[in-house]
Amino acid sequence: MNYTLIVAAQTAYIFISLCLYTLIFVYILWSKDSEFKTAFHRLFLLRAPADFIQVLISLLAFRFPIAGWKEWTYIPHLAKLGFVISQYAVLVEMCAQLLLSVNRLSAIVWPIIHNKFWTKKVTLLLFAFGMLLAIIPTASRATQPAAYIDINGSFVPHLVNEGDQEKNSIVTCSIYSFFCGSSLFCNISAWLVHRKQRRMQFFDTQPKLASTVQTNLLIYACLSTAVVIAMTSFQFLLALHVFDLKTEAHKVVVVSLTVSADAFALSNPWLLFCLSSTFRHKFLEARRIPRIFAAPSTNETS
C-alpha cells in the first residue's frame, strides 16, 4: 500500500476543506442574518477550533510519520502531543455532535419550547461543560511516554509502556460507544417523530420549507453519527489487540482511524454547504468579502 500517496491525498483534502471551513466560519461569525443565530450555527462555530486543531496535529504527528517522513519523528514529544491533543479535540467534537443530536430531537419533538431553551447562554454552558468533562479521560495520557516504531519504512506512533495502548483504547471505546448510543437514540427518536409528523401532514399549515429544513438537519446529524461509529469500530480493533503492533494490518487500522477522524472533523462545512440550499445561496452571494461585513439593510432589521 502506497502510504505516501494516501497521505498526499489526505493533505490535499484537508487543505481544501480547511479553506472552505474558514470561509464559512468567517461568514457565519460576521453575518448579520438572524438565520445564523440558532443553536445549530453556534455549535458549528464552537466546534470549529477543535476540528482545526485535531486535523492539524494529527497531520503532523500521525500522517507525515506514517508516510515515511522520518524528520518529523525528531520533534521532541510529538507522538505524545499527538495522542493527547487529538484525543481531547475528538472528545470536544463528539460533545458538540451529541448536543447537535439533542438539539435536533428537541426541535422536532418540542418545537414550541425549543427556541426558548436553546438560548446562546445555555448553548455556551453546555458546550463548556462538555469541554471540561473531556479533560478527565485525556489527562491520563499526559503521563504516558510515546514514541514511533518503524514498520517497513513507516513510522507509526505508539505508547511505550506495555498495556497502555490497550487500556486507553478500551477507555476510548467506552466513551465513543456512549456517544454513539446517545446520538443514535436521539437521531432515531427524532426520525420516528418526524416521519409521523410528515405522515399526519403536520407541516401543511407551515411553509413546506420547514419540513425540508428539519429533514436536512436530521440527515446532517445522522451522517456525522455514522462516522463516529466507524471511528469506534477501529478503536475496538486497537483495544482488543487484534493485530500485533509491528504488522502491516495494525498500520492499516491506524490509517483508517485517521481517515475516519478526518471525515468527522471536516464533514461540518461540506454537509452544511451541500444540504442547505438556502445557506449555499447566501454564502455564494456573499463571496465578496465586503458583503460579509456589510451592515444589514432596513428590510433585514425590520
Image (cartoon, rainbow, N blue to C red):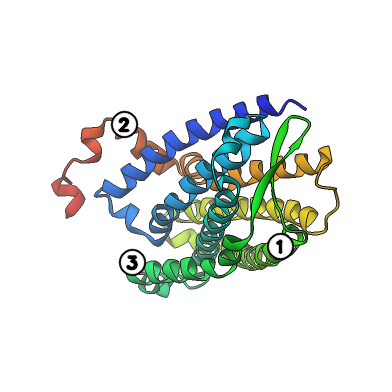
Q: CA distance from mark 1 to mark 3?
A: 31 Å
Q: Residues within 10 Å of mark 1 (few under 14, many from 20)?
A: many
Q: Secondary structure at mark 2?
A: loop
Q: Position of residue 22 (x, y in %)?
A: 39, 39
Q: CA distance from mark 2 to mark 1?
A: 41 Å
Characterize the local packing of mark 3: few (<14), some (14-19) or many (20 or more) Cα atoms within 10 angstroms: few
**Left or right of residue 101: residue 2:** right
Compared to residue 177, the image places residue 85 above or below, namely: above
Task: Give the answer, above or below, for where 294 lies relative to 135.
Answer: above
Q: Residue at x 71, y 53 (%)?
A: 160
Q: Quadrant of residue 284?
A: top left
Q: Residue at x 63, y 68 (%)?
A: 182
153 to 198, vertically: above or below: above
Q: Earlier in the sequence, mark 2 or mark 1?
A: 1
Place residue 277 in its image quadrant.
top left
In the picture of the structure, the residue carrying the numbered disc 2 is: 287
Q: Position of residue 139 (x, y in %)?
A: 56, 66
Which numbered circle lies on residue 173? Answer: 1
Q: Closer to the observer: label 1 or label 3?
A: 1
Q: Kindly state the secondary structure of the residue where label 1 is placed.
A: helix
Distance from the alpha carbon under mark 3 to that under mark 2: 27 Å
Horizontal side of residue 119 vs 270, given as left or right = left
Q: Quadrant of the C terminus?
A: bottom left
Q: Residue furthest left?
A: 298
The image quadrant that residue 241 belongs to is bottom right
Q: Say which amino acid is labelled 2.
A: Arg
Viewer-proximal residue, 235 or 221? 235
Which part of the image, by quadrant, shows the N terminus?
Answer: top right
Which residue corresponds to mark 3?
A: 120
